[in-house]
Image (spheres, rainbow, N blue to C red):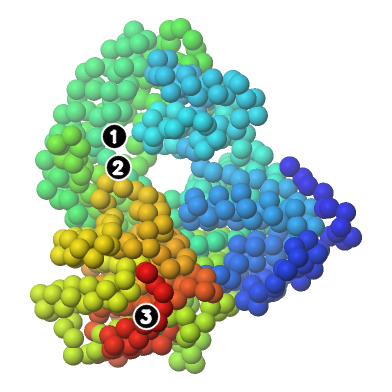
Amino acid sequence: MTVTAPETFQTAPATWAEVEVNFAKELPGYEPRKPQQIMATAIEEAMTEGRHLLCQAGCGTGKSLGGVTPMLLQALEQETRVVVATATKALQEQYANKDIPFLQEKSGIDFTWALVKGRSNYACQAKLNSDDNERNPLALEVKQELAADEAHDGDREHFLAEISDFEWSKLSSSSNECPGKSECPFGAVCFAEKIKEAGSQADLVITNQAMLMTDLVIREKTSDRDQGPVAMLGDYGMVLFDEGHELPEYAGNALGTDFNGRGMVLLAKDCATFAAINGEDMQHRSEKMAEVIKGLNGLLVPLGGAALTLSWFVENYGLFADLMDLLRSMRLDIHAVKLDGDSDKGNAKKKMLLTRIGNALSTLEEMLVSEDADRVRWVEVNEFRQEKHWKIRVAPVQVGPWLKRNLWDKVPSVVMSATLSAGKNRDGSKDFTYIQRTLGLWDNVSSVDVGTPFDFGQQGLMYVPAPSVPSPKDRNAWMSWSIATTLELIDTSKGGALLLFTSRTAMKQAYEALADRLDDRGLTALMQGDGRTNRELAKIFKEDEHSVLFALKSFFVGVDVPGEACRLVIIDKMPFPVPSDPIFAARSLAEEREGRRPFSTLSIPMMTLTLEQGCGRLIRTKTDRGVIAILDSRLSATPYGRSIVNSLPDFPVTTQLSDVRSFYQGSTFGR
Ligand code: SF4
């Protein structure tokens, strides 16, 4: 995978400035970007000095190349390796298919790199060869494709066959069921293991935050092994987080866990089937499991949405103790099964079942004993085939101390995103306190905001209602005003509108009130969750300049619609976190315990970050123009509202709809 620098490059570059000289030679008309140069220099300095950097860089900065290039140069200089971790698959693919190949071809830097995804992205040899898939036509097709192409890496994306998520789960393994290379009879030919090995040698690894956080969790759990900790990504000396605002969530997911009743019933059935194939009878265990879970259903289904405390678990210990006893008995039974027939196939299945049982037991043990101040536990209930099923979710209250111990104290890192700061300090500089507190990143760190290449003053306008408009707290009056105003704004922009809602109920109400009226005007109304995927909806919205998309929180980030297709963004109200959310409630309590006011230190910054992300949907290129409207009069009527407006992108602000009309007047939008 090593590529030698083309002959046009006389010497290998050592700095971003030298890389830009090579870009200029290779790309006629190459134009350096000031914000990109500022960020690259800040990263070079931070990595040279071995400190962390919080780097805020707006859309259009050229973050990925401006971030990865100085990291790579410094890693090569210091003879170490660098890991780049994105939050989304789309950005990971962009690095792998566009930015890194470009860097290899045009920069003159000589390096090797690898793309490493999570285990479940690769076909599992143990499953492909199992009895379960013997008559599965898709498994046969996948096996044929693999046999025809020796260089196939087993990546789901590289199969010709269209494979649904459900079908793929039968052909791949999650870490919950994989026993690991040394235990698995197919470990030597495992695709995920081969990718990991290749990745652990590369100068640069492109991965995702979920994978990197899992790597840290496993390293910590195996840190006292004689042969050293298990390191899925090898040893690395620097980390770059792109889409860094998502890091707290991915760290929380890696440290958290789920335990669901239906999964236990399926596990017991799988054990019984495996035992029966090998001449043993575990049917009674399967029936007992169904009975124990039924008992827990009665207890947990009525508690949907509620947080569970340690004392609740102590009170109800008996039912969970029965479950643990049963799992232990199942483990003994499976151990005792003597295999008939192909030993590799049978052994692999046996190891996978034992791994699932072992993981269920350790999750239960951890769930039952964790302190309330450390972990938040709550019940989620959903319906499947007209039956209600529960899941107990467990998440850490804080991820900062763990990140400090396992990452910040060990590896210089850059956390990069368009939205890291929430609000401004008294001197007008960006305030990074919230993200620093969340990440536990206080020591040996600096921050930089490189600004934006866009001219918000010329390219856009922000509308917030006058103080006299009903507040969202006055629900009925606000609702009828906001629906009328939304329609007026859409009429003014002639469509091309992304409507972002803070609740599903509000989105549905607005859609029901407006869809027919939009249709009468020749505009296409689209709604998130209408049966189409988010990706499909975004595609239609991009292509149809006369569409209006009603959407929820997932559209506040990630959706990139440059040009006229998105010329109006309306946010219904300030997106405050929901007080009943168990993680938010637990974090609020933790803030109070430490003597801080959660409204100031948690609610306002969380809301501001989401609002900034929503505003970021409007201007995506230097030629975009449009209006952002936030239909919440608290933004003009309260001191905290005014200070929030002050911290948003520097659009001119108006409380008059007539200014919005003037902004669009004379434009060719929607014609
Ligand atoms: S180690 Fe075995 S079980 Fe795990 S993914 Fe690889 S082939 Fe599958």
Number of dots carrying numbers? 3
Q: Disc 1 versus disc 3: distance between alpha carbons?
A: 55 Å
Q: Amino acid at mark 2?
A: Phe
Task: Please give left or right for residue 300 compared with residue 212 in the image.
Answer: left
Q: Position of residue 497 (x, y in %)?
A: 33, 68
Residue that mark 2 sits on: 259
Residue at position x 85%, y 59% in the image: 9
Q: Quadrant of residue 352?
A: top left
Q: Depth check: give the residue in front, 423 or 508.
A: 508
Q: Is residue 376 left or right of residue 127?
A: left
Identify the mark at residue 285; answer none if there is no mark. none
Q: Is residue 629 above or below residue 206?
A: below
- Most extreme residue toward the front is 671
SS at mark 3? helix
**Is any atom of residue 242 visible in this view?**
yes
State which mark lies toward you, 2 or 3: 3
Q: Which circle's residue, 1 or 3, is located before the other in the chain?
A: 1
Q: Residue 190: x, y in percent?
A: 57, 29
- Asked if the residue at tag 1 contacts the one at tag 2, i.e. Cβ–Cβ closer than 8 Å, the answer is yes
- Per the model, the C-alpha gap separating discs 2 and 3 is 53 Å
Residue at the spot 28% in from the left edge and 59% down from the top edge: 524
Q: Residue under label 3, please give it.
A: 664
Quadrant the C terminus occupies: bottom left
Residue at image location 55% in from the left, 67% down from the top: 416
Quadrant in which residue 316 is drawn: top left
Q: Nearer the viewer, residue 229 or 225?
A: 229
Classify mark 1: residues with Cα within 10 Å, few (<14), some (14-19) or many (20+): some
